[in-house]
Amino acid sequence: MITFDDWYKGLRLARKTVIGRKTIYLEVVKSTMDEAHRLASQGWEEGVIVAAGRQTHGRGRKGRKWVSDPGGLYFSIILRPPKKVLGILPLTLGIAVARGIEDAVEVNIGLKWPNDLLVEGKKLGGILCEAHGGKEIEHVVAGVGINVLNKPPRGGTSLLLLSGKVDVPFLICELVSRIDRAYHMVRKGESDRLLDDWKNKSVTLGRRVKAYLPGGREVSGLAVGISDNGELLLDVGDRTVALNSADVSISDLEGV
Ligand code: BTN
């Protein structure tokens, strides 16, 4: 299990200004998302991390279950971003997490829109962003799940399988440092470099994908770009449609 000690050592080394100034570690929790939402609603500040050794009801995007056995890295962060960056937040966190992992472990990560982390076509981890509030967003919780030492679910992979050995505190240090830096850039309106880096590591752009829209409709097309707002631009033949990560699931047609 990834322990309090791993987090303590990792955070002590991390270069952090906002993210991880305060971290709560729970050995077992239903979902770190729920804990982080609860604390955020009580007024806890931006940057607080809720980490867990395992989760009994971990969740992924689109209401999917996120298997959270001991050995995986599971954490959620309380954020209070300006509304205008909500669209790009998932992508910028995705590239920060990918680069953080690559700093610590010798792997080459591909990003599948909006923010699946893949290695050799297998899922290594994912990010879930949940906004709370009505028209005025009160807070966002960003959850990160990475298969580290745990046995990955079918179709997945783990850092242990990929590299044989993982320095967990160093991994935590690099992740927190990268997320802190990326969030700082996003807040300042300087996310262009992050989005360019996201595009470089994308395994979605240039491929044909199928998107599932709310209400059961499907569209297929060529993924041609990302809008300034983080939407996936799909060339469907006679026009280009912009897909919003909050509403759409995609599967590839070309076997990523
Ligand atoms: C996805 O790929 O669907 C996103 C997975 C996000 C999983 C993380 S693990 C920590 C946090 N707590 C949860 O219940 N989910 C996120």
Image (cartoon, rainbow, N blue to C red):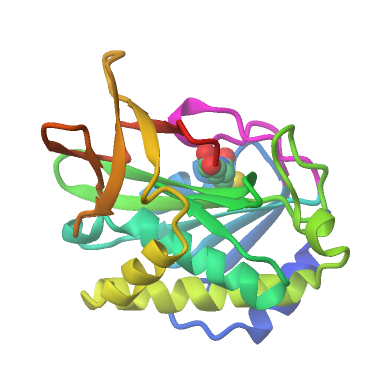
Residue sticking out furthest to the left: 238
| 94 within the magenta span | no
Number of numbered discs overlaid on the protein picture: 0
Where is residue 244 drawn, in percent x and y? 26, 40
Span shown in magenta: 54-70
Of residues 151 and 32, the one drawn nearer to the viewer in this rendering: 151
In the drawing, does residue 247 fall left or right of residue 42?
left
| 59 within the magenta span | yes
Could you tell me which residue is drawn at 41 percent across and 47 percent down?
Answer: 113
Residue 84: image quadrant is bottom left
Where is residue 242 drawn, in percent x and y? 19, 41
Residue sticking out furthest to the right: 164
Is residue 201 visible in the rendered structure shown here? yes
241 is higher (above) or lower (below) than 65: below
Where is residue 245 drawn, in percent x and y? 32, 41
Q: Quadrant of the C terminus?
A: top right
Could you tell me which residue is drawn at 61 percent across and 49 percent down?
Answer: 125
Looking at the rendering, the quadrant in which ligand 1 lies is top right
Where is residue 253 drawn, in percent x and y? 45, 31
123 is higher (above) or lower (below) than 95: above
User: What type of secondary structure mainly makes up the magenta span?
Assistant: loop
Could you tell me which residue is drawn at 26 percent across and 14 percent down?
Answer: 215
Could you tell me which residue is drawn at 87 percent across and 67 percent down?
Answer: 165
